[in-house]
Image (tube, rainbow, N blue to C red):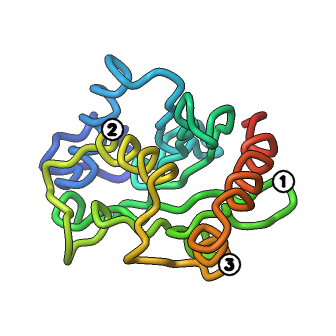
């Protein structure tokens, strides 16, 4: 226990809490092995420490798809209830401040994916790596049964060529991340 003015020793997993301990372990494993071109790291704080409950990530567009070339920023927000509850994941806005153009991405950027839904497919054994790979797969394979944004959903359903043009243009906007 910390006494007034005494330096704090490194916390044990139990002192850290289950969520923080799990996220520290995931960070360690990610640094050893992660998919090419993906980025996932706890947010850096002004004092040089890390906020393990908030991660800044990059999901690359999959090669050979209309998303290729884009590097899409994703924020993962974990609660102290992780891994019992999934993180909230949001895509960042494009350079013009617009949300990601995709049928399963809310205007807020929140990702509508069953893996991230505690009532659907969430399992505590899922890792950050699993989630980011799932998010990448969702980009090129939207779920028509769970639309989150009206315009991309309508265009995807009614004019696939127009949808593909929009996504390819968007990939260029996200190429510099």
SS for dot 1: loop
SS for dot 2: helix
Q: Is residue 47 above or below residue 82?
A: above
> In terms of depth relative to the viewer, which is nearer, 82 or 92?
92
Q: Residue at x 20, y 55 (%)?
A: 17
Q: Earlier in the sequence, mark 1 or mark 2?
A: 1
Q: Earlier in the sequence, mark 1 or mark 3?
A: 1
User: Relative to 96, is 116 on the left or the right?
Assistant: left
Residue 150 on image: x %, y %: 62, 82
Q: Which residue carries the number 2 mark?
A: 129
- The numbered dot on residue 151 is 3
> In terms of depth relative to the viewer, which is nearer, 52 or 106?
106
Q: Residues within 10 Å of mark 3 (few under 14, many from 20)?
A: some
Task: Farthest residue to the right: give it.
Answer: 96
SS for dot 3: helix
Q: Quadrant of residue 6?
A: top left
Residue 67 on image: x %, y %: 62, 42
Q: Residue at x 60, y 67 (%)?
A: 156
Residue 139 on image: x %, y %: 51, 52
User: Relative to 101, is 115 on the left or the right?
Assistant: left
Task: Farthest residue to the top: give it.
Answer: 32
- The numbered dot on residue 42 is none
> In terms of depth relative to the viewer, which is nearer, 159 or 63?
159
Q: Which residue carries the number 1 mark?
A: 95
Q: Earlier in the sequence, mark 3 or mark 2?
A: 2
Circle 3 or circle 2, nearest the eye:
3
């Amino acid at each position: 226990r910390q006494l007034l003015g005494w330096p704090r020793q490194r916390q044990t997993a139990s002192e850290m809490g289950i969520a923080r301990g799990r996220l520290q372990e995931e960070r360690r494993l990610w640094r050893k092995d992660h998919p090419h071109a993906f980025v996932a790291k706890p947010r850096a704080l002004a004092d040089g420490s890390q906020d393990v409950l908030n991660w800044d990530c990059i999901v690359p567009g999959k090669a050979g798809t209309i998303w290729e070339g884009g590097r899409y920023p994703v924020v993962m927000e974990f609660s102290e209830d992780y891994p019992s509850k999934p993180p909230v994941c949001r895509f960042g806005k494009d350079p013009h401040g617009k949300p990601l153009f995709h049928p399963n991405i809310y205007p807020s950027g929140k990702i509508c994916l069953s893996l991230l839904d505690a009532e659907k497919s969430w399992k505590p054994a899922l890792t950050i790596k699993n989630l980011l790979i799932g998010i990448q797969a969702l980009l090129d394979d939207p779920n028509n049964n769970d639309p989150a944004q009206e315009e991309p959903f309508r265009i995807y359903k009614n004019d696939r060529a127009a949808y593909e043009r929009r996504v390819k243009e968007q990939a260029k906007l996200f190429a510099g991340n």
